[in-house]
Amino acid sequence: MGSVERSEVALSSLPPPQPPPPPVAAPAGAGSADAGQEQKPAQNGGPATGAAPAMGEEGTEYRGLPGGAPAPSPASLSIVPLIFIIFYEVSGGPFGIEDSVGAAGPLLAIAGFLALPVIWSVPEALITAELGTMFPENSGYVVWVASALGPYWGFQQGWMKWLSGVIDNALYPVLFLDYLKSGVPALGGGAPRTVAVLGLTALLTLLNYRGLTVVGWAAICLGVFSLLPFLVMGFISIPKLRPARWLEVDLHNVDWNLYLNTLFWNLNYWDSISTLSGEIKNTAKTLPKALFYAVIFVVVGYLYPLLAGTGAVPLDRGQWTDGYFADIAKLLGGAWLMWWMQAAAAMSNMGMFVAEMSSDSYQLLGMAERGMLPAFFATRSRYGTPLVGILFSASGVLLLSTMSFQEIVAAENFLYCFGMLLEFLSFVLLRVRRPDAPRPYRVPLGTAGCVVMLVPATALIVAVLALSTLKVALVSLGALAIGLVLQPLLKFVEKKQWLRFSVNSDLPGIDVNHQPAAPDDPLLV
């Protein structure tokens, strides 16, 4: 775990406090980036506001939100709930890792969950820590790409990541019912399964509607309950462990596509928390520390049950599919442990659902506040939550929940890979073009070091894309093509004033010309 120890310095070291500069009155007719740019009244009849910097597209200006729009809710996420939300956005526990053993055997599965965090999870978490504190707002990775490549590609990033997130969220009703169907066979298909999906989606959507404080503390409770049976199973397995079983491998019988997709799915989405950056208390200090602790939490949460399950039970690779940990629990501890494991799986999937939906819905809100989506997406409920974004995300989940586990994982990974390529490119470009821009947290590597850090991760992306089936590739590329057309269509709708688009004038300029706050104070933008 030497690499994880080194990452502690990378993820927890912060620059010394810097007091915010005194306010300076802007000269008339000047924005924060484009000095001398003529002020214009806000579109759609809104009041004129101070001119704001262009987002890299000629004729596109910042505009204030309508006067009647509710003010953003105060930041509500502290470090402990944030760690558990990250845990659920990335992992949620070892439910779903069984296919890695079925695809490649114990040795490659264990090696994968040791190596991939170094290759992928740590670099992605580091990038999220730097750019998430550099742009502490709910558009997250969308504004990272918009700042580096312009608003067109920022929108494409938002489309790919939102669609990937919704596809990911469609997994959790599938996993939930797969774990319960051995005890309740009626949930295996037909009307009972459909009713269960609808009811579960409605219940968890309501939790998101009630606010991030509810989501955060629900994540803590669900996380503790979901991991306890694995802790018990591990202790029970000790007398039966046979370390030689961990070394079993057959390189001639490896499903590399399923193996890599399972590893990748279980160790990505570290950047999802960036779409909640505007809701975090003291983002500059809290986000990097939460990411560091979450990396350790996730890796240990995978390896512990994987070592227990493969070491204590004779290998039958055909049995290692999603839901198999419940069968292992029965073999080792009896029916009571199996039922506990199934209940824990249900709770874990609830936690993953609410965390992912929070990220997806706040992303839509953040895009609307940047003028990339119609203004109604910025509507908040009386609890401060993104009402329209929640409803859109829930609808997408229901439409996709009929797909199989393997199909969902492959499709979301394909889309996610393209989004990560844009993210990596934007990270490097911002380092090259704006080396002196304020970064409350900075990855402790130079630009060349950052490029080297991203080479293995990029190679992994290429491998995942290359191993995708033709069906998954065609469906995913079709989804990407929709985004290429959707952005110009929305610009046309805005030009015709068929829908209102507005930009939150409280947000910093896209040129990141703002100063960081002291670590112990709220971040000022």
Image (cartoon, rainbow, N blue to C red):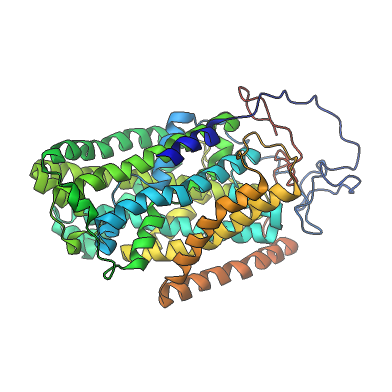
Furthest residue toward left: 334
Tell me: residue 121, above or below residue 459: above
Q: Is there any visible trace of residue 349 in the rendered image?
A: yes
Out of 182 and 64, give the one closest to the viewer: 182
Q: Residue at x 71, y 60 (%)?
A: 494
Q: Which of the 4 quarters of the picture holds residue 525?
A: top right
The residue lying toward the viewer, choosing from 439 and 400, is 439
Q: Does any portion of residue 402 appear in the rendered image?
A: no
Q: Residue at x 52, y 47 (%)?
A: 123
| Residue drawn at point x = 85 percent, y = 49 percent | 40
| Left or right: 376 as drawn, with respect to 353 | right
Viewer-proximal residue, 269 or 332? 332
Question: Where residue 485 sits in the image (x, y, percent)?
Answer: 63, 70
Between 316 and 66, the one lying in front of the other is 316
* Residue 500 in the image, given as x and y percentages of width and height: 68, 54
Residue 173: x percent and y percent? 31, 55
Q: Which residue is found at the position 42% from the left and 52% from the top?
A: 116
- Is 367 situated above or below 496? above
* Number of marks drawn: 0
The quadrant of the image that shows the N terminus is: top left
